[in-house]
Amino acid sequence: MEATRPASGDTSRRLRNPIARAFDLLVVGLNALGSVWIFFIMLLVCADVTARYVFNSPITGVPLTITMSLIAIAFLQLPDGLKAGRVTRNEALLGLLLERKPRVGLALQAVFHLCGAAMMVFLVVYIAPMFAKAWSTQAFLGTRGNFTLPEWPFKLVIVVGAVITALQFLVLFWRDLSERAGLSRNKVPSDSEPVS
């Protein structure tokens, strides 16, 4: 039985797949890290409550640790939330357009994803110098002599999370353009005809 030769499109798809798989694993890994972090925060809260009521001695630094952890966890899990379609947007309008006028809907969705990537880039540009300053000066959060946390790890998590989220926005942007181009090539469905 003669083996069929893969089309050039299949070959290029296979070449891209390792990079896509590696990026997907990175996104899932960050989300898992955020979930583990949440678990340890829950343990810390339970330990603090127990120490307060049983020993009348709360664990020092728990409120500050939780406050900074929530910010870090949000940025760790943002790329996976975006990939899974859990980022807030106007589904009433966009969903209707995607159903009835898919070319317009995909174009609008592509603009949404491109704007999201731009916002993440602006955030990185804003936070990166703050991370560099916190790293170089060894800045800390809290009160010296009582409880302190180094500031740079939290800034680093924000920068990394924002960069990965920007890349995820661009992946979705490219997917929207590809799907819209596919509709144009197939000429089905048209913008004037609802999708059945």
Image: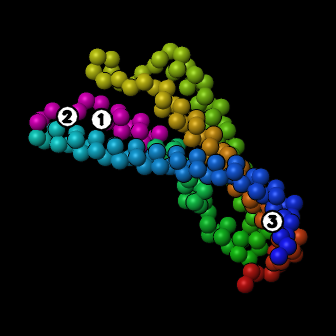
**Residue 41 at what x, y percent from top left?**
34, 43
Name the residue that disc number 2 marks: 58
Task: Classify residue 85 as left or right of residue 97.
Answer: left
Name the residue that disc number 3 marks: 180
Three-letter amino acid code at the position of disc 3 = Arg
Q: In this figure, which colouring scheme has been used for the structure?
A: rainbow
Crowd band around label 3 with a 10 angstrom C-alpha radius: few (<14), some (14–19), many (20+)? some
Disc 2 to disc 1, how far (Cα)? 8 Å
Give the camera-side residue of 59 and 1. 1
Asked if labels 2 and 3 touch by Cβ distance under 8 angstroms, the answer is no
Crowd band around label 1 with a 10 angstrom C-alpha radius: few (<14), some (14–19), many (20+)? some
Disc 3 to disc 1, how far (Cα)? 49 Å
Disc 3 to disc 2, how far (Cα)? 57 Å
**Residue 184 vertical placement versus 79 (above, below):** below
Residue visible at 55% across and 26% down?
131
- First in residue order: circle 3 vs circle 1: 1
**Residue 172 at what x, y percent from top left?**
70, 56
Magenta range is 55-72
Task: Classify residue 146 as left or right of residue 196.
Answer: left
Quarter holding the N terminus is bottom right
Three-letter amino acid code at the position of disc 1 = Val
Name the residue that disc number 1 marks: 62
The answer to which quarter of the image holds residue 144 is: top left
**Residue 195 at what x, y percent from top left?**
74, 80
